[in-house]
Image (cartoon, coloured by chain):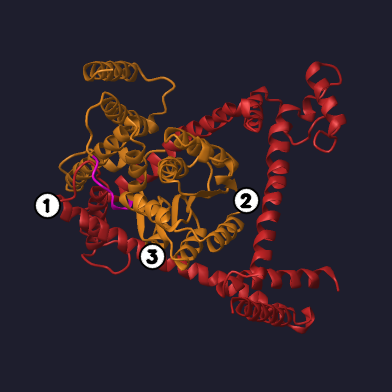
Amino acid sequence: MKDREFFIGSIFFIFSFSIYWFLGHPYFITERLLMFVAIIGFGGILIFYTRKAQRGEEIFLRTIPGLKAVEEAVGRSTEMGKPVLFVPGIQDMDQVETVAGVIVLGHVSKMTARYETPLNVPVSRSIVMKAAREACKESYLVEGRPDMFHEDMVHYVTDEQFAYAAGVNGIMVREKPAACIYMGKFYAESLILAETGNSIGAIQIAGTASQAQIPFFVTACDYTLIGEEFFAASAYLSEKPELVGGVKGQDIIKLTIIMVIILGLFLRLAFDLGFIDFNILKILNTK
Amino acid sequence: MNFEIFGAWISVFLTLAIFSFLYKDNPIYKIAEHLFVGVSAGYWMTIFFWTQIQPNLFGRLWPSKEYSETGIWYGLYDVLNIVAGSIFPEGGIDKGHDLHFSYLIPLALGIMMLLSLFKSFNWMARWGIAYTVGMAAGLRAYGYLNSNVIAQLKATIIPIANTDLPIFSLLGESHFNNFILLIGTLTGLLYFYFSKEHSGVFGKVSKIGIYFLMISFGASFGFAVMGRISLLIGRFVELITFSSSSYHHASLWVLLLMVAILGYSAVTEKRTEI
């Protein structure tokens, strides 16, 4: 789909929806208009930039310091002849952080295959185990080292949060990995894992969007990918146009939000001073 | 010794065994760790089966409400009843559900996940993973957009013209606090802008954003640490309770035993090293 076709499609959609709206919009929950507009608008922006990336147009993404550190960490493990430990969080594949973690795992496993470094991935969910195995298997195949891949490198520990933390701690103190990479959704076990990793002297890189856990990783790890940085990192590493384009699309959404905030400030000021009758806050009260 | 006292001794042993990790990795910690991991893995599987799969999946495919002795569907159920009577009780599963054939889809996806145990059917697991990821993305998009975007927008459009608000207030709403909220949101958003290098004026603005983030992380860290300390106090309270004579001084005896074992193990290790 080219830009012209995309714009024609968008105009056609807006025109059709306008007709439907002025005809009385049956079956449409009016209170959810804002959400509808936001989903369609943001979705449109994401599709536009994804298509752009798929067409091969170059999209610039700034360097994220934690990303370079991943390669350094795997290199260090190789030099020391010790394994790399990758923890993809404690949640299932229905969490976007876990999906991003598995994407980063794909990249890390490519490096471990290239450098012939042992990789250990303890997981706490069966579906994550399956997905992580697939990601590692593919990476080892791509790197031409299928002989080095064995299913046990991704192994299930338990679903229970603290039992998982205890199990991973045990692996850390016994195997003494040179690099510990935590990428996924974490809860209270984050500090337990990061502190143990710190005590064995491993280089530690974390990435999560779990707001309450970021401070613990920032304190105990060498590098931390904060929130959106983590998602951008997974897109950057995957080199998939749909993900890279998605990051650019999200940047445009952020700019749109900033503009809406500034415009909203002026509209509210004008409303409060009695210059206009339009109350922006009423529009934002959605269900 | 009744079961309460026995339970207290087990609880004290496991608590102190986990605490022993603070000294170093040792056999007592290993016992507790392996017990914890093994028991929880089995416990989760059992709980998940009896609280989700049996009542919510099988209970909707063969509800007792619609049970009939004739017909193929419940005929199949009767066969299952003979094979596993505790899972498929006689007369259908009574969990208050109606018959929903749409639940055959999750059943099929579940079976496909299990079939991945066989190498030739390995690809089938991808369907289940794809469904989980796609369903969650669609389901959460609305909620996240509402709570993370629209609610934040609403909070950031501050009342500049409100004369009732004080200029500065340590707690509660004030023009100063509103201004901080506005600047924090805008600079925070700019910090997470990835398609432009953070240099020049843009770099300086995004740096303010990271300062805001770090301050919020610091506050969050302090709050979480307070919560963790209350958990630690909870464990200590239990250990103190179990050290009383009504529990035969469980905490003291177990502590002494552990110190003796760890001391002996340290001496043996040192001798081996020499």
Relative to the observer, which residue lies in front, B167 or B179? B179
Q: Which residue is mark 1?
A: B200
- Quadrant of image for the N terminus of chain B: bottom right
Which colour denotes chain B? Answer: red
Please tell me whether mark 3 sits on a helix, a strand or a loop: helix
Q: Identify the residue shown where x is 71% and y is 41%.
A: B49
Left or right of residue A240, residue A4 in this image: left
What is the CA distance from the residue labelled 1 to the residue labelled 2?
A: 48 Å
Q: Which residue is mark 2?
A: A158
Please provide the residue range marked out in magenta: A61-66
Please tell me whether mark 2 sits on a helix, a strand or a loop: loop
Asked which quadrant contains residue B147, the reply is top left
Looking at the picture, does residue A125 appear above or below residue B28? above
What is the CA distance from the residue labelled 1 to the residue labelled 3?
A: 28 Å
Specify the label residue A219 is tagged with: 3
Do marks 2 and 3 share a subunit? yes
Q: What subunit carries mark 1?
A: B
> Which amino acid type corresponds to the residue marked 1 in the rendered image?
Gly
Q: Is residue A64 within the magenta segment? A: yes
> Which amino acid type corresponds to the residue marked 2 in the rendered image?
Thr
